[in-house]
Structures are given as structure tokens and as C-alpha cells.
Image (cartoon, coloured by chain):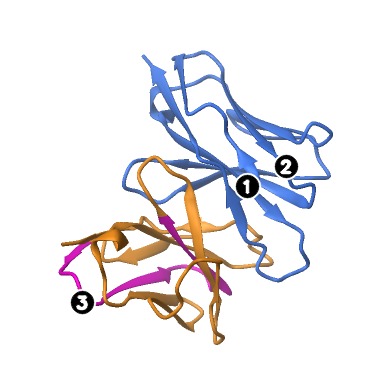
Amino acid sequence: DQQVKQNSPSLSVQEGRISILNCDYTNSMFDYFLWYKKYPAEGPTFLISISSIKDKNEDGRFTVFLNKSAKHLSLHIVPSQPGDSAVYFCAARGNSGGSNYKLTFGKGTLLTVNP
Amino acid sequence: GAVVSQHPSWVICKSGTSVKIECRSLDFQATTMFWYRQFPKQSLMLMATSNEGSKATYEQGVEKDKFLINHASLTLSTLTVTSAHPEDSSFYICSARGGVPRGYEQYFGPGTRLTVT
């Protein structure tokens, strides 16, 4: 059972436009959400995160929105740049009370920003 | 800050041999380290979680006798793939978490491509 879903395997946008990457989750115990960016043959790089007590977090060109009632979050990149082309993973952390707080990842969305 | 390295970056080994992969946090102390595996076009699959000085916690379906994890210090964890077989060929990625005050974000290493022939 996939608890974190990224239903769009790929997305293509024009340089300068907005990129919107979506993520849905099913586990209501998740309390912290993260977005990672990954280039081929490299490890993921942390981008931005959001706590479940917030509905928006912004960092430069990146903004993450969280809709808890819909169990949905999205990453907005404005303006999109060719260097943003990568696979973006959505991840969620559970609040199980354990000390490890392991992350559950979606399958990723390949973003291509065309010049 | 928050740099995690892995060594080697790629390795080719023969079936039946063992391979050790190192994961180091270079500029912070990692109280917890995680080992992931990624197949082509698939998500990151958590294999195990290790805390410094204690035994690793393996995810369901991961053979602990095959994937040996040692977290000997706050900056080093190792994954040893024992008696490797071609189906073990994959991209292995470690991550490290430093906890408060650094936060709960995991910082990932660059990954190790293992090919078993």
C-alpha cells in the first residue's frame, strides 16, 4: 500500500513559467513533509519542508503548500529554470512516537524545464 | 553544511563475494543513519535504520544477515552486502540525520552503484 503518491511521473514546463508538483498521502499520522530533488546517479538533495501545523512554507523560488483535509501537498517553483530539471521526491515523516522518524517517499516526478 | 559522503561511488563484484559501502557525515554528528535502495524508475526503498552504538532496525522483507549494517561512530555507518548475487545489483543510498538542533531533515549521500556479475 503506497502511503505517499506522486501520480504524475513527469512534467514539462517552459522556462520562466510556474512548475507545480503534486503529492497525496493516505496516512493521517504523517506530521512533517519534505521535498527532495534528485539528479541521475546522485543522492537526493533536501529542498524544502513543512510541518503539519502550517499550510505554507516559502524559500526563495520554492513554495510548499499543505492541505491537511485533502491530504495533499504541492511544490511550486517560480520562475522555473532549466537547472531545475530533475526528479522531485515528496516524502512524509510519521509521528509514531519512535525516535527514528523514518521517511516514506513517493515514486518521484521528473520535471523538465525547457529553455 | 550537512555533507554526507559515500564510498565507493560504484563497484562491480562477482557473484558470491561481499561488498562494503561506507557512509560518512562530514560536518555533523549523525545520531541516526538510514540505508535506502533504489531500482530504476522506482522510489527510494528504506532498508534499515541505524543508531550509533546499537543494532540496526531492518524493514520488513530485508534480510539482516545479508545486509550487515554497522554504525560504529557518530560519523560512520557501513553496509556490507554479503554473498552478493546479480539481483542485489542496485543503487544504494545512505542518509544521515543529526537531530536537534540541526533538525529532522535527512541529508543524503551521493549513492553507490553496485553491479554484481
Q: Residue sitting at 66 percent across and 60 percent down?
A: B103
Q: What amino acid type should be assigned to the residue bearing mark 2?
A: Thr
Tell me the chain of label 3. B
Q: Are marks 1 and 2 in contact (CB under 8 Å)?
A: yes
In the rendered view, would you say B1 is above or below B39? below
Alpha-carbon span between mark 2 and mark 3: 41 Å
Q: Secondary structure at mark 3?
A: loop
In the figure, B99 relative to A78: above or below?
Answer: below
With respect to residue A20, does A43 lie above or below? below
Alpha-carbon neighbours of circle 2 within 10 Å: few (<14), some, or many (≥20)?
Answer: some
Q: Which hue is chain B drawn in? A: orange
Q: Which residues are magenta?
A: B11-37
In the rendering, which numbered label is found on residue A43? none
Q: Taking the image as drawn, is residue B8 in sight?
A: yes
The residue that label 3 is drawn on is B17
What is the quadrant of residue B101 in the picture?
A: bottom right
Identify the residue position indicated by label 1 in the image. Answer: A1
| Label annotation for residue A26 | 2
Provide residue B2's location: percent of width, then percent of height: 50, 60
- Colour chain A is painted in: blue
